[in-house]
Amino acid sequence: MNILILGSGGREHTLAWKIAQSNKLTKLFVAPGNAGTNEIAENVAIGVNDFEAIKKLVLKENIDLVLVGPEDPLVNGIHDFFLNDTQLKEVAVIGPEKLAATLEGSKEFAKEFMMRHNIPTAAYQSFTSKNLEEGYSFLESLKPPYVLKADGLAAGKGVLILNDITEAKNELKSMLLDAKFGNASATVVIEEFLDGIELSCFVLTDGENYKVLPMAKDYKRIGEGDTGLNTGGMGAISPVPFADEAFFQKIEERIVKPTVEGLKKDKYPYKGFIFIGLIKVGNDPKVIEYNVRMGDPETEVVIPRVKNDFVEVLEAVANQGLDSIDLEIDERTAVTVMTVSGGYPEAYEKGKEIRGLDKQNESIVFHAGTKIFENEVHTNGGRVLAVTSYGENHQEALKTSYKTLKDIGFDGMYYRKDIGFDL
Ligand code: AMP
Ligand code: GLY
């Protein structure tokens, strides 16, 4: 099979690394890819939202399957674009159709879905500029902290958690009246605050059957002790020590099954990954959000624990045959530590040479924001490398990643030294 992966992050390098190990693979392409995918696949300089250029590539290279990494092209309808094109409609696309991708594209849509299917989540109401005053009253009826969410995609920045009622009202006004997050905040969801520890559940569905992939926990804040600004993710661990069998059963019965059944009942066509952001409140799981893709950096710990031939798994998703797949999961713990450019998630520099990538180590170094410049690997983004290691437990695995990181460097490199501190 010829396969195309869309995206350029650590998630896509990990998926490429896994797919490259399959006997079923003929040729692998990544668009646009990074310096890491360049070593195991052919990078093609096409943006993930340039559907016409993707079409040309798919036809020219006889691509059989397209695996969509990020949410953007899914929310923009790439799967529908393939289905509606006579030349492309036989090509398998892994990722939901546009309607189902709205689960990530609109928080209000996701909330309504959860209400309809009795999926546990925070109580909420949504508001637009037309009922701002009602928004103020709703805020007054809640206890702090106040959770305000821009309805649409806001590059991970659209959620505000505020302690002060006056500040919450001002922010609500600025989201609704001054387009603080552009069109994304034309509608705002205000939620009950949930107090607990977060974890992520990944489900692969073919629209009929599903498989639950290993659970993971990511570390979103830039600073140690979970302080400072939110980032795309500074590290991850799988499995999650506090998600024992009894807790997992609750997740599967109360959340995974009703989600997959709900997609069927509502006729939301879905062949792809569902990333369910969860919070453990007391002993009960509640949904914080749905994403319609794999997480990054969770992919860097989840996929290395899957032992199956991944092309077989993806084919089963495409052919609605997931029921015939038995997932085999590595018992070991996998961890990843993300190295980032100084200044990230605010302003940072790119184009720094990365040293030490050729040194032997016991980790798997996945590339995120990297590119080849004059035959050297240079930084090309905020998140740069995800250093994944296995171990008997997360402490052992982390030792290996931190050891590997002693040999790797670039100007301004930063990483958290406390991944897993709260477990
Ligand atoms: P989201 O984009 O919906 O995942 O929200 C971003 C982050 O905000 C989550 O990862 C949580 O840490 C936090 N968050 C979102 N909703 C809530 C809530 N209802 N209660 C507490 N924290 C929340
Ligand atoms: N690590 C969180 C995300 O991928 O959205």
Image (cartoon, grey):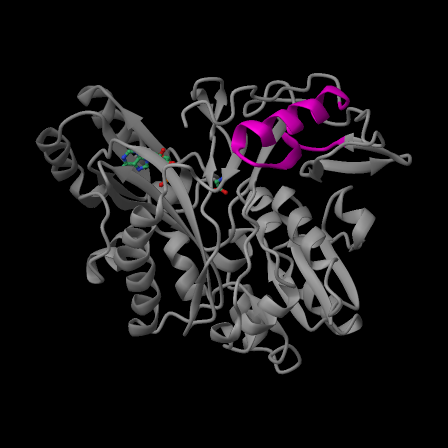
Residue 300: x percent and y percent? Answer: 60, 43
Q: In which quarter of the image is residue 181?
A: top left
Q: Residue at 67% across / 38% down in the picture? A: 368
Q: In which quarter of the image is residue 41?
A: bottom right
Residue 333: x percent and y percent? Answer: 54, 40
Q: Residue at 61% across / 61% down in the picture? A: 308
Note whether 400 is above or below 255 in the view shown: above
Is 220 displayed left or right of 56 in the figure? left
Residue 319 part of the magenta segment: no
Is 63 displayed left or right of 262 in the figure? right
> Of residues 252 and 25, which is closer to you in this image?
252
Quick check: can you spot residue 340?
Answer: no
Is 405 displayed left or right of 117 in the figure? right
> Of residues 16 and 253, which is closer to you in this image?
253
Q: Quadrant of the C terminus?
A: top left
Q: Residue farthest to the bottom?
A: 86
Q: In which quarter of the image is ligand 1?
A: top left
Looking at the rendering, the stretch of residues picked out in magenta corresponds to: 379-408
Note whether 181 is above or below 17 in the view shown: above
Residue 143: x percent and y percent? Answer: 13, 27
Quick check: can you spot residue 169?
Answer: yes
